[in-house]
Structures are given as structure tokens and as C-alpha cells.
Image (spheres, helix red, strand yellow):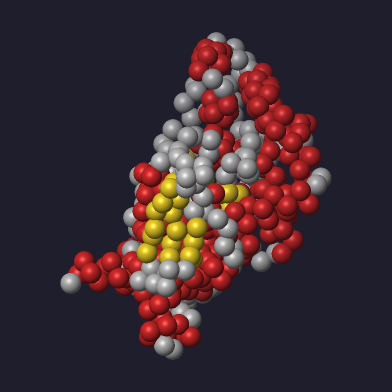
Amino acid sequence: MASSSQAPLRVLTGITPSGTPHLGNYVGSIRHSVRQSVAPGVQSFFFLADYHALIKVQEPQKIQRSTLEIAASWLACGLDPERVTFYRQSDIPEIPELTWFLTCVTGKGVLNRAHAYKAQLDKNVAKGEDPDADVTAGLFMYPVLMGADILMFNAHKVPVGRDQVQHIEMARDMAQRFNHQYGEHFTLPDAEIDDAVATLPGLDGRKMSKSYNNTIPLFAPRDYLRKQITSIVTDSRAPGEPKDTEGSALFQIYQAFADAEETEMLRKAYADGIGWGDAKQLLFERIDLEVAPLRARYDELMNNPAEIERILLLGADKARALSKPFMTSLRHAVGLRNLAAGKDKVAKAAKVAKPSFKQYREKADGLFYFKLLDARGETLLQSRGFTSPQEAGRTIAVLQAERGAALGTLAAQLEPIDSEGTRAVTEALEALAEATSTNQGS
């Protein structure tokens, strides 16, 4: 899908509410993503993937509790809902609709190769069971839902771990198939892997993971945090004996929180034979130094779930300002159209077949404006004032390239329109794109 050179880089991050956030989540995703969200020229989308959670969690209270905890965690860690679009997946009804559109262009063979599906099949075969035992359609279709999450907002970059790269590749395949069949609508997303982001070991030295039950909760009370850190597995070397930093879970966790100077001090202490109890106390103090202020905000949010709900619903409004007009455009593209528009070809031609843009300058304020007109010269869309004709022209170019999807993005530069107006403008922009394509092909 074409875009303006002025358009921001869109980065989309999904978080599945399937448990309590832990230190590994913080170091591996939350902290880095929150910092990146304030980078200039970046438009960030963060969503709670509660539809995805239903695939592996069938406990309603756990879904609700985890959604609350994860939302509170991201907000407490500095995610600014004014600056980013922070929403709950299930509040965007256009996502399951797009999932169906993508389902209809995605080959079953592509889904057969999905890692999670294949892993379950291999597990069943190894146990001598039916290959599809315990395989739900949700597990099988998971990559399509993920594709819809990404393509709905035409994300350019999707930060993922290496085990998720396949899903981004599958989303690209879906976008290409749809674009080939129905015209250019979707951006082809790229996976973003940051090897500098740490992966924390857990209490037993393996990767910190809920599946291993070896996690340290991110916002555990101070005394419980100390208790968890005390239980980190270490070797039997006594105080005074030099200790290896290589392979030390305790050292790796400390390094993820400390600066270079602090890390070097602990490295020297290891060489000098620091006792494990003293090393664990240093780790506790360093983690608590960073987490304690965030914990206070987390506790405040957890005690006020109505505030989190309000923030998520406002985020859904921001997201749907993009998804609703884009879905209107996609529905038109696949043929789910207003039947009355085809009743009279002459009337149809007058409404949308020959729309045009008109640029002009107002003498009263000296600013530059444009209108989108139908064939009868009636205004479908009115811009607000621009300081230069080039700026107005670039906005027109974005509308021509992105059609209905651009209405939400450019809302600040356009006069408001209602849902009927949005439909009319979207159909006009689609018709203009079709007419341009036909003219270029003839």
C-alpha cells in the first residue's frame, strides 16, 4: 500500500493476557517498548490480545484478571495513552471481520506449517494419539488472527522474538495475496528483532517463563520480591571462593538492571569471592531501586480498575477512527457494497464514478484548502487550512493512496464527517482509484 513520505513509521506490539507480568516481560519487552514509543516519527500501537488468550486459557476470571494486571503494568511502566494507541483487541470489531477476509485468501497449506500447530501435532504423534487431538480451530487459525491485528493498522514494524518471525512472514503472505486479488490495500510488515534486549533466566537458571513456573512477578510486594530472589539457584561455592559470572542466573539478572559501572563492580566482587547471600541482597536492592516507583503506580491503578477501563475505551476510539473507515474500504474492495449504488448506472456515475479534488486559497485567512467533490460538484469532504499548497497536495496524495484508511490518520486536517459521509467519501476514493487504474491500464 502506498504511503506519503511524511507518514510516520507504524510500530505495533501485542500482549497476550495469559498470566501475571514478570521481570522477564519487563526486561524483554515492556521497558524497551515504552522507551521506543516516544521516539520521533513513530506512531505506536499497543494492544491487549485477549482474543488470542482464549486459545489457551478457558478460565474467564483469569482472562479478566490478567488483562487488568497487564494493562496496569504497561501504564505503570510509563506507556503514555495520550501519545500511543493503547487498546483491547476485543474492543475492535473490525479485527474479527478482517480475520475472515484474510481467511478467504490464506491457503491451508500455509497454516499447516505454523510452528504452534506443528508442535502440537508432533506431540500427539509422539504419544501415539490422533495427530489432531486437542487441536482447536482457534490454535490452527491463530496466525490469521495475528495477521488481522497487524494488517488492520498497516504496521510497518512488529517487534517479536525469533520464535514469532514466522507469523510476520505469514502476515506478509496474506497481505500480498489480498493485494493481488483486490488491489493495493495493505502494507507488508517487517519483523523487528532487537538482539540487545535481554532474555532473563528464571529462578532455576532456565529462561524465565510462566510455563516453567520459575518467574519473579514484576510488581510483587517488596518482601516477596526479596524472598524470590533469595531462592535463585546458585552453586555450592562458599564465601571467599571466586565465582564465575558465566552461566550465573543471578549475575545475568543483575546485569539487565544495572549500568556498566555497577555490572563491573559485581563482576569484580564475584572474582573476589562475594558470598551468595550478599550477591542476592545486591540484586534485590538494584531491582527494587528501579521497580519500587513503578510498583506504587501499579498498585494505584490496580485499586482503580475503572480508570484502566476508561483508558482502554479511549484507546479503542482512537483505533477505530482508523479501523472503521479502512474496513469500509476493504468491504467495498471485496464486493460487499451498497446495492442501491448499482441500481442506476447514471446515478452511480454521478455519485462516485468521477470524483475530483479542488484546491484553492481563501483570501480571508490566506490559507490553502481542498475539497473532494462528486461529479455534480457537491462537496463530500472539506479540508482545514494549510500553510502551503504543497502541504495540501501531500494530504490529497495520502487520501488517494490510502483511501478510507487515511480518514482517521488525517482527521486533524479534515472537517468532521459522520458515518454516512465516511461511506460516501470512501466509495468516492475507491472509485477514483479504480478509474485511475483503468486509465493507466488502457
Residue 87 lies, in percent from the top left, at: 61, 54
Q: What's the residue at 69%, 27% (across, down)? A: 288
* Left or right of 65 in this view: 189: left
Q: State the quadrant of the C terminus.
A: bottom left
Residue 56 lies, in percent from the top left, at: 59, 63
Foreground of the two, 377 or 281:
377
Q: Across the whole image, how many numbered discs are drawn on residues?
A: 0
Quadrant housing residue 297: top right
Residue extending furthest toward the bottom: 343
Residue 152 lies, in percent from the top left, at: 48, 60
Task: Please say if 206 is above or below 252.
Answer: below
Is residue 434 at all visible to an observer of this figure?
yes
Residue 135 lies, in percent from the top left, at: 51, 72
Q: What's the residue at 42%, 83% (across, down)? A: 347
Foreground of the two, 358 or 92:
358
Task: Please say if 347 is above or below 68.
Answer: below
Is residue 328 at all visible to an observer of this figure?
no
Foreground of the two, 68 or 271:
68
Q: What's the residue at 49%, 61% (across, down)? A: 381
Task: Please say if 389 is above or below 416.
Answer: above
Q: What's the residue at 44%, 33% (across, down)? A: 196
Quadrant housing residue 352: bottom left
* Left or right of 84 in this view: 157: left
Q: State the quadrant of the N terminus.
A: bottom left
Residue extending furthest toward the right: 303
